[in-house]
Image (cartoon, grey):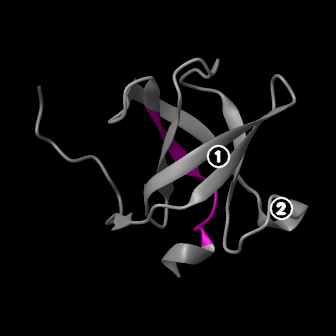
Amino acid sequence: MSSIDRRSSPRLPLVKPAKIFLRGTWRYLPAKTRDVSTSGALLELSEDRDVHVGDTVDLAIAERASAILRTDEFIAGRIVRISPGQQPGSITAAVHLSRPPAHTL
């Protein structure tokens, strides 16, 4: 396994509820952030979610205790990597974002 780090910006640990919108299927999926950077986020999802490398998504990270997220809270992105999650029954998805999330500014 390669130890080369291809990240373009440093990651900040951040565990928060998140939601992704899969544009191809018009579905919202619950997720949890593991870390974020100015160019992406690492998410943890249930392994039964049908997500694939290359999927176009919109990501929103909860900043308050509300199940409702506004449209302007979503950031366009693309899934660039999927791997087994840290928890049984989960996967991690690395998402490259079109702009920095507010959590990294």
User: Does residue 86 sit above or below 8 in this rendering?
Assistant: above
- State the residue at coordinates (49%, 75%): 104
Residue 105: give x, y in percent of width and height: 53, 82
**From mark 2 to mark 1, how far is it between C-alphas?**
17 Å
- Badge 1 is on which residue? 77
- Please state which of the two labelled residues, at mark 2 or mark 1, is closer to the viewer: 2
- Badge 2 is on which residue? 69
Magenta-highlighted residues? 92-101
Residue 59: give x, y in percent of width and height: 68, 51
User: Could you say which is closer to the camera, residue 55 or residue 20?
Assistant: 20
- State the residue at coordinates (60%, 44%): 31
Residue 22 placement: quadrant:
top right
Q: Is residue 46 left or right of residue 68?
A: left
Give amino acid for label 1.
Answer: Gly
Q: Looking at the magenta stretch, what is its main secondary structure?
A: strand
Ranked by sequence position, the earlier of labels 2 and 1 is 2
Residue 96: give x, y in percent of width and height: 53, 47
Residue 10 placement: quadrant:
bottom left
Which mark is on residue 6?
Answer: none
